[in-house]
Amino acid sequence: MRKCKEGNPKYQALLYEQYSNYLMGVCMRYTRNEEDAKDLLQDVFVKIFTNIDSCKEDGNMAGWIHAIAVNTAINAYHKKKRKGNTVDMEDVEEMVADIHIQQNDFLSEKILMKFVNELPDGYRTVFNLFEIDGYSHREVSEMMGSSYSTVRSQLFKAKRSLQKKIEAFLGKELKDKGIKSKETTQEPTSE
Amino acid sequence: MKQEEEIGKLFHDKLAGFEQAPPEGMWNSIQNNPDLKKFNRSRRFRKTALRMALPAVVILITAITLFFTLSPESPQKPGIQTKPATTVQNTLPVQPSTPSVTTPEPVSTLPSSSPSPAHTSSLPNTESQNTAAAETSDATITTHPTPLPVTPDETLSSDNHTQPAVTTKNTPPQKQGLSSVATETSPVTTQHANHSPSTTLPTNHKTGELPLRFSHDTSVCRNSKITLFVENAAEIRWSTGTQMPTLDLYIEDPITISADIHTKEDLDTTIYITISVFDCGLFIPNAFTPNGDGLNDEWLVSAPMGITNYECVVFDKMSRHLFQSKNIHVGWNGTSSDGKLLPPGAYFYVITYLDEMGNKHVEKGQVVIAR
């Protein structure tokens, strides 16, 4: 099953079964909602199947598939940008407050994914590429076609935005649970 | 706690392995995708076409002799026999890595119609394939990625003898489709075009010493004084508002400083320097003023993180024991062991302790009494 089947449609179904959940997860990260993720996923699979020749048989197929997914996501972003459909905030926020995330257990995957989805398109793409998919700053700037400093700035803003969302969420959580939110300091976790 | 890194790490840890079942009917939509349908059709064609190849060989060999007389490219004819054999091996993308296919001519014409779309449909290969395909004079070979010439086998045998792979059908390069994208995660490197990596990692955390100088992201021990600077900056405006070439900071908490820069080469950019904070072992003041003014009257060592087996000894230049304590909360008031007030000057301490991991640490240094 590991072989890149050159265009044989029967094996496409197998490949789909094996990678669909994983790739759906990736697509969810790079889009605003499930609807867009669905569209992206379809593009990704079509790309995979029609470009199957370029997958080396002795190579890392999962890595190749991942790269296709990421590339397709970036292309989708650029396409959207050209059409003027992106949501990109440019407002400058004040310096972030230094509140630390300590209650990691409150934050489920679903919540975090929601926060990522809510990011402006450019920030979300850059954040995913760098933080989750592990590309370097330089690689990200090449893939996005933006300057290194733009990428860094977008990353910074993305993280800040995410942090604010987390703080807001946690603040609400704590209130709901009737816990007074304590002034979080630099307490080390182990005493 | 490195705040910015924390966020990245948090999201990475929780979302990197995130999987979700696609909605129902996803596979159906994929299968019905027009591009995919065309692709599959072309591959199926190629497969069945190959099977037809062998019987067709015989027919074509005889047909060639006919063409020999008819075609103006007669001098090339002898070449046709040999060339296609080699090019066929390369143009047959069915098994990209097996060049040992020796199917004769007719097969070579078949893939000429299908692989170019198939190959051109892979993104980075598009350009090379298009130029290769463009060379062919065969009308049935298209350069477009999408339309598949649906040429049945019969017509191939009649039309394409003169233009089999002779017309330099370039070998489809067997490139990895996405060579420009790293498929492996590479280590994160923070690169600042303007900065020189000329920092010294903090070796101590005492205040009052020469501030450490940094020009890029770094981590320091809490309560260090650092200096930020940017090389190559003709003009700089730090996010704190100052426009001095260097920025002094006293680091208590993680902080990110930005600066708008106008470089010597007339470029404008904004840089970001993130300082993360380590809770270093001990905070040992290196000076105090036991003058009864209520401010720093006592020399007190503190340990932000849990330590054990604390021992502290203070002595003077003559190695006389002045003070000793096994309790970190007990400070030194600047008197000798028999209670005499000591003159201002430099004294020495040796502190040993075990950190949370049980590693032994020894700290030696000066403590200055100022009055």
Image (spheres, coloured by chain):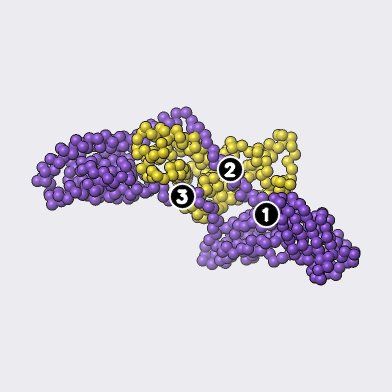
Chain colours: A yellow, B purple
Judging from the image, mark 3 belongs to the subunit labelled B
In the picture shown, does residue B180 fall above or below A76? below
Q: Report x, y in % for residue B145.
A: 32, 43
- Judge from the rendering whether residue A81 lies leftward or rightward of residue B225; answer left or right: left
Going by the numbered disc 3, the residue's amino acid type is Ala
Mark 3 or mark 1: whose residue is earlier in sequence: 3
Do the residues under discs 1 and 2 have CB atoms within 8 angstroms?
Answer: no
Query: Tag 2: Cα neighbours inside 10 Å, few (<14), some, or many (≥20)?
Result: some
- Which residue position holds label 2? B13
Q: Is residue B191 left or right of residue B332?
A: left
Q: How dense is the environment of label 3, judged by Cα within 10 Å: few (below 14), some, or many (20 and up)?
A: some
> In front: A176, or B182?
B182
Question: In the depicted view, which residue is nearer to us: A177 or B242?
Answer: A177
Pointer 3 residue:
B182
Subunit that carries the residue with mark 1: B
Among the 4 quarters of the image, the one containing residue B142: top left
Q: Is B335 located above or below residue A149 in the figure?
A: below
Do discs 3 and 2 belong to a common subunit?
yes
- Give the image location of residue B239, x and y in percent: 63, 57
Q: Which residue occupies 18% across, 39% down?
A: B57
Q: Amino acid at mark 2?
A: Asp
Q: Secondary structure at mark 2?
A: helix
- The residue that label 1 is drawn on is B278
